[in-house]
Amino acid sequence: MAEGGQSPTDTKIEFEPYCKPSCEMGDKNEFGVTDTLGAEEEKKLVRKIDMRLMPLLIVSYGLQYLDKTSLAYSAILGLRKDLNLVGQQFSWASSIFYIGYLVASYPISLGFVKFPLGKYLSILMFIWGIVLTLHAVAPNFASLMVLRTLLGAFESAISPGFSLITGMWYTPHEHVSRHSFWFAGNASASIIGAMIAYGILKYEGSLAKWKTLFLIFGLISIAWSIVMFFYLPDSPAKAKFLTTSEREFASLRPKKFQKTTQTRKWDFVQFIEAMKDVKTWWFFFFSFVICVPNGGTTSFSTIIIKSFGYDEFQTILMGLPASAFQLTTVILAAVGTSFIRKSRLVALVLIYLMAIGGILMIKLLPEPEKLARLAGFWLIMAVAPAFPLMLSLSSSNIAGFTKKSTVMAMIFLGYCAGNLAGPQFFIATEAPGYHTAYTTILVCFVITIALVVALRLYLAWENGRRDTEQGVHIDPEEKRYVDLNADGTLLQVDETDLQNRSFRYIL
């Protein structure tokens, strides 16, 4: 029974249609067993899923990062001069992206429930590719602002959508590694983008260099969205690359931990529960606080590096180690938290302690120490694993499809608000020192650590309370194997983490 005496099955839910293995005459279980998915068979199935999903997600996420940060590269390719951007106009061109993102977040989250997820994301990607391509014909500041707003609106689906996909296909123990894998597309794309920008710097054609950049990035996104449309499945139950029995095992694996089923109906009860849940608001505030520094350093990355005393060519080259360092820390965090139990929140604290060291290097070292200050900037950029860790915590600790979609929308409201505010702390009159920006970043890092400690204490207390209430200790990170006879009914259940009292939270 749910809290308040209401059974979670009292609400009529429209589920994805699904055909049991018996629906297909002659279908044989390729795993060599009748109804149970054993350890070796599960490894083979997960590997098959990884080989299809991860390349699609990694490339797509890398492209959205390139498209979003193309403004930073265009800043040293002549955009500010050609469009006569003065004062805080470049900062606003960066921030307005997140206003579009913010406004679109809630309508986009409704689409996750109403439409086939894979097709929905692919179509939105196609549209944002067109919008990015149109940046090349922007004649002035006003037109640039309109295009950046639209780009933010259509890109707002990618991160929450991919997090929902990860939750649908993988168990909580696998969440952090898979979130990190596709998030690593950011760092990989940043390296590729820097090399493309470096090549464009040497371009001497008639078309402006910044326009060439937007055309290249935009057309690549359009082409890739077509690939996504045909190859990204909407759900495990609709995955054509799996056999019928594989689809059922793939659908049931996550449900052994979270009784969450993709539906086509918005559950108002789950929505209200999400709004009352303290975890929802923690994710919102945490997302906001970590994205204030991100919004500034991402949009001003090339400007910050150049302010240390480097020319345009050196600026792009000096950004490459930062991207490589980002990629390294994302991989290390994914591997470490996958093998060390109860380590996700501990990893977040360690990451932000390192970042605090980086910001202090920039603030306290004298200007002639440009290489040391640059190393401090690399340390700040190495907070990249924080975002996939946060998404994995949300995916693992929030259950119920409508509730999960709502919390994702709240995370990205915080994401938008933080990224919107971040560039405004880089005040043009303070260049190249940007004292206000660096002090704000330091304060945000300190607040982040306090929030992480508070969440860990709360989740550990809640797990202990449920253990006492039920008189049994349940390990949220244990291995659980699928049995079709015992677990088949889970395909018809959609419960939240509060309704399911056997639910335990990942630390």
Image (cartoon, rainbow, N blue to C red):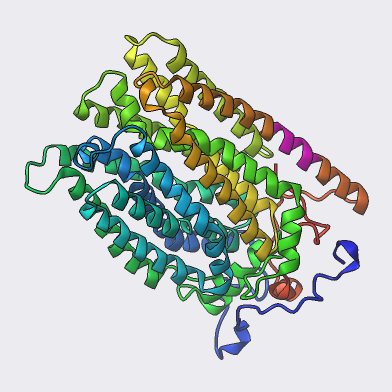
Main SS, magenta region, reads helix
- Measured as percent of width and height from the top left, residue 3 is found at 87, 61
> Quick check: 45 above or below 84?
below
Does the magenta run of residues contain 457? yes
As drawn, which residue projects farthest toward the bottom? 25
- Measured as percent of width and height from the top left, residue 97 is found at 41, 49
Task: Compare residues 161 and 70 and report the one nearer the observer.
Answer: 70
Q: How many marks?
A: 0
Q: Residue at x 24, y 52 (%)?
A: 138
- Measured as percent of width and height from the top left, residue 56 is found at 40, 60
In this rendering, would 202 be left or right of 484? left
In this rendering, would 54 be left or right of 107? left
Q: Quadrant of the N terminus?
A: bottom right
In this rendering, would 283 be left or right of 367? right
> Quick check: 336 above or below 116?
above
> Quick check: 375 above or below 36?
above
Q: Residue at x 36, y 21 (%)?
A: 374
In this rendering, would 137 be left or right of 408? left
Q: Residue at x 28, y 25 (%)?
A: 306
Q: Quadrant of the C terminus?
A: top right
* Residue 246 seen in render: no
Task: Compare residues 42 and 225 and report the one nearer the observer.
Answer: 225
- Measured as percent of width and height from the top left, residue 469 is found at 92, 51
Q: Which residues are magenta?
A: 453-460
| Quarter where residue 218 is shown | bottom left
| Quarter where residue 263 is shown | bottom right
Does the magenta run of residues contain 262? no
As drawn, which residue projects farthest toward the left? 205
